Image (tube, helix red, strand yellow):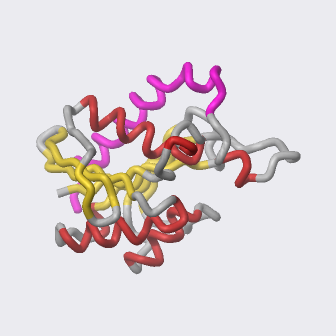
Amino acid sequence: MKIIACLGNPGKKYFNNRHNAGILVGAAIAQHYSITVGRKEHDALTGSGIIEGNECIFMIPQTYMNNSGIAVQKVLSYYKELPDNLIVLHDDIELMFGNVALKFGGGHKGHNGIRSIQQHIGTLDFYRIRIGVGRPSDSVPVADYVLSDFTKEEKNFCEDIIHKTNSILIECLHKKS
């Protein structure tokens, strides 16, 4: 079984923030596969279903971005899954807006959600689908940038980003763990 963790912050205040790219894209992909992510358990909203013959649990941590690892660790433990069956969808300022990339392992590069997951599950070895949100200009602090909403122009590319992410997710689901 694959655990797909969609990172972001809960609540309406943060809903359209760049930091919520993991939730926004992950929820759209889950919906595409008729997976309802609404069960409240393990400090997360969860939903289960089948994608391309693979049993998947989508989870949206409700612990806020900086404590994402708490919920991820609880879900992995409950389902008795190893970290190499974890796929994390998250925003990434190191990628240009609209780019999407798969990564296995490695450091957190200052991303507090990834840092929290690494600390709580005790390894760097899990899959990450990095959703590019671009870098802020020099005059805008990173925290302010990622906690700001996507622009109207950026929202126009949403379907393309969802499609790219879904293609990478399918590729990742077919990797042997």
Whole-percent x, y for residue 65 in the image: 52, 59
Residue in the picture at 27% in, 29% down: 32
From the viewer's perspective, is 147 left or right of 106?
right
| Nearer the observer, 156 or 171 | 156
Looking at the figure, which quarter contains the N terminus? Answer: bottom left
Looking at the image, the residue that sits furthest to the right is: 139
From the viewer's perspective, is 6 left or right of 175?
right
Residue in the picture at 26% in, 56% down: 40
> For residue 87, what is the image quadrant?
bottom left
Total numbered labels: 0
Whole-percent x, y for residue 142 in the image: 73, 52
Residue in the picture at 42% in, 37% down: 25
Q: Is residue 110 magenta?
A: no
Q: Is residue 154 magenta?
A: yes
Determine whether 41 is above or below 148 in the image.
below
Looking at the image, the residue that sits furthest to the left is: 53
Q: Main secondary structure of the magenta part?
A: helix
| Nearer the observer, 99 or 70 | 70
Determine whether 163 is above or below 73 in the image.
above
Q: Which residues are magenta?
A: 150-177
Residue in the picture at 63% in, 36% down: 149
Whole-percent x, y for residue 80 in the image: 18, 72
Looking at the figure, which quarter contains the C terminus? Answer: bottom left
Whole-percent x, y for residue 113 in the image: 52, 62
